[in-house]
Image: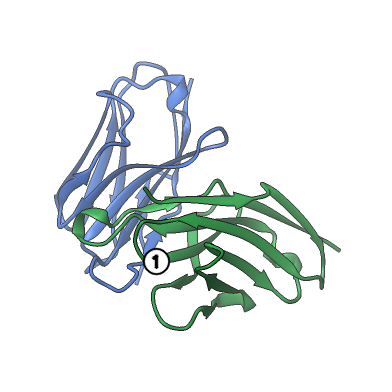
Chain colours: A blue, B green
């Protein structure tokens, strides 16, 4: 299996621009998670989907952030407009809900820099 | 509410020495507990997990952890550190049971350095 695939791996953009991060979960998994990691705040859950339906989006910072999962094999995280404080590494993870102690499998992350 | 506390943001050991990374949890239900490792510029990788049954859990790369309910702890150990163990380690607890509780609560992480 290819594992969780994220693109792009690195993104540098200017303040005010729209940024779209992409994730392809592991085939057969039914849960998907978006995390943000910074030195200051550590690893934060942004949003969590189960069977393509958003279950918990309480971690989404504000209306500038949105996430979609149109089908079981693709998800996007969009930031519009982007701000310098959004600079972080964004991870996507997928898992099989219902597996005992369901493990999350992380992608390699997207390093976002907003200038 | 579930929470995880990792004691020590940085731990340094000599190669060949015992590795001990501490994790205490708070959970209102019997917990599912996890240890993940993150190598530089990579995503998190599962080391081991505790769900039910045997309280001593063995994981990859020679690591193990013991679930101690009385101490609400899930410390990670390895008898002999190797240079390749240098990484950041995260302890996590599952938020709860059921489909809406599937996310993990992560600790702040502990960076492990291994000296030659």
Picture coordinates of residue A47, whole percent (x, y): 28, 43
Q: Is residue A115 above or below residue A6?
A: above
Picture coordinates of residue B102, whole percent (x, y): 28, 57
Instruction: Give the position of the N terminus of chain A as an image quadrant.
Output: bottom left
Task: Name the outermost residue toward the front.
Answer: B70
Picture coordinates of residue A63, whole percent (x, y): 24, 23
- Rendered residue at 47%/64% (across/down): B34
B107 or A91: nearer the viewer: B107
Task: Name the outermost residue toward the right.
Answer: B116
Q: Is residue B44 left or right of residue A53?
A: right
Q: Is residue A94 above or below residue A84?
A: below
Tell me the quarter of the picture where residue A78 sits: top left
Residue placed under numbered mark 1 in the picture: B32
Q: Is residue B27 left or right of residue B71?
A: left
- Rendered residue at 56%/64% (across/down): B71
Q: Chain of mark 1?
A: B
A36 or B53: nearer the viewer: B53
Q: Is residue B47 left or right of residue B28?
A: right
- Rendered residue at 39%/66% (across/down): B32
Task: Name the outermost residue toward the bottom.
Answer: B54
Picture coordinates of residue A58, whole percent (x, y): 27, 36
Q: Secondary structure at mark 1?
A: loop
Q: Residues within 10 Å of mark 1 (few under 14, many from 20)?
A: many
- Rendered residue at 39%/44% (across/down): A35
B1 or B80: nearer the viewer: B1
Task: Name the outermost residue toward the top.
Answer: A16
Count up the numbered dots: 1
């Amino acid at each position: 299996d290819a594992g969780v695939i994220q693109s792009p791996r690195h993104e540098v953009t200017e303040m005010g621009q729209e940024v779209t991060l992409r994730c392809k979960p592991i085939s057969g998994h039914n849960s998907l998670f978006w995390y943000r990691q910074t030195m200051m705040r550590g690893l934060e859950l942004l949003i969590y989907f189960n069977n393509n339906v958003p279950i918990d989006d309480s971690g989404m910072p504000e209306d500038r952030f949105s996430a979609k999962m149109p089908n079981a094999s693709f998800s996007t995280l969009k930031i519009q407009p982007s701000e310098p404080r959004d600079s972080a590494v964004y991870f996507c993870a997928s898992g099989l809900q219902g597996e005992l102690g369901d493990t999350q499998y992380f992608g390699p992350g997207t390093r976002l820099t907003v200038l | 509410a579930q929470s995880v506390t990792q004691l020590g943001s940085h731990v340094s050991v000599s190669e060949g020495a015992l590795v001990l990374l501490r994790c205490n949890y708070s959970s209102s239900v019997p917990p599912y507990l996890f240890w993940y490792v993150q190598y530089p510029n990579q995503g998190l990788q599962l080391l081991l997990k505790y769900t039910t049954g045997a309280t001593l859990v063995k994981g990859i790369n020679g690591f193990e952890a013991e679930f101690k309910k009385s101490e609400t702890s899930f410390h990670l150990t390895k008898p002999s550190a190797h240079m390749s163990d240098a990484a950041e380690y995260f302890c996590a607890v599952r938020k709860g049971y059921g489909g809406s509780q599937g996310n993990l609560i992560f600790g702040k992480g502990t960076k492990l350095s291994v000296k030659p």
